[in-house]
Image (cartoon, helix red, strand yellow):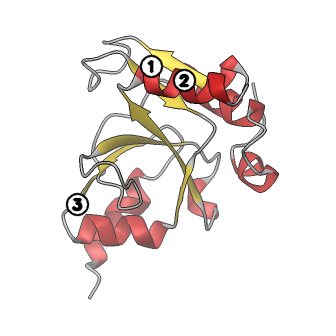
Amino acid sequence: MIDISADVKIQVTLCKGAVYYFVEPTFADTDQPHYFVVLNEKPLNDTTIVLACATSQIQKRRKFVESRNLPETTLVEIVPGAYKHFSLPTIFNCNDPLEKTKESLVLLLNDNKLNPFLDPIDSKIVADICRGVHDSPLVENRIKKLLGELS
C-alpha cells in the first residue's frame, strides 16, 4: 500500500534542480546511494522524470567520454562546496540520464529508500547539466525535450 503522505512529499519537492538521494537498483556495480538532480522543466506535468547522477568517480567518467569520442560538454564537473552536500570533486555524465516515474520515486520514499528533502542545486549547475544532455548524441530527443529550452 502506498503512503499518501509519500505521494504528497514527492509532489511538493519535485521541481527542476531538486536533489534526491537514493540507491538506484539498476546500478549493477554498487549498492551505495547517489545524489540525483531533477532536470525536467516541468516535472509535475511529465510522466518521465529525468535525473542526472552525481559521482566522485571523475576519471572513470572522463575515460568513458574520451573512449566514445563524445563532446567534453557532456561532462559537468563541480568543485567541493559548489553544492553543500558534495564534499569531494563531483561530476555528472550527461550521456546517460536516468528515467524514473513519479510513482517509482513515491515507492522509494514509501520504503524509506529516498531522501527528498535536500536543498536544490544551483540553477547554473542545472543549466550546465541540461546543456550537456542536449549536447550528447546518445540521449534521445524525447528526453531532451523534457528539459526545456536552453538559456
Question: Which residue type carries mark 3?
Answer: Lys
Residue pointed to by mark 3: 113
Point 29% across, 39% down: residue: 118
**The C terminus lies in which quarter of the figure?**
top right
Position in image of residue 72 (x %, y %): 67, 18
Q: Secondary structure at mark 3?
A: loop
Dots 3 and 1: beta carbons under 8 Å? Answer: no
Disc number at residue 63?
Answer: 2
Q: Amino acid at mark 2?
A: Lys
Q: Which mark is residue 36?
A: none
Which mark's residue is nearer the viewer, 3 or 1? 1
Considering the numbered disc 1 on the image, is that residue within a helix, a strand or a loop?
helix
Q: Relative to 100, is 93 above or below?
A: above
The quadrant where residue 54 appears: top left
Circle 2 residues within 10 Å: few <14, some 14–19, many ≥20: few
Q: Which residue is mark 1?
A: 59
Q: Is residue 51 visible?
A: yes
Find out whether the residues at labels 1 and 2 contact each other: C-beta distance under 8 Å: yes
Q: CA distance from mark 1 to mark 2?
A: 6 Å
Q: Amino acid at mark 1?
A: Gln
From mark 3 to mark 2, how far is it between C-alphas? 31 Å
Q: Where the N terminus falls, by quadrant? A: bottom left
Q: Of the two numbered discs 3 and 1 on the same chain, state the one appearing first in sequence.
A: 1
CA–CA distance between discs 3 and 1? 28 Å
Outermost residue on the bottom side: it is 1
Out of 133 and 15, give the one closest to the viewer: 133
Q: Secondary structure at mark 2?
A: helix
Mark 3 neighbour class, 10 Å CA radius: few under 14, some 14 to 19, many 20 or more:
some
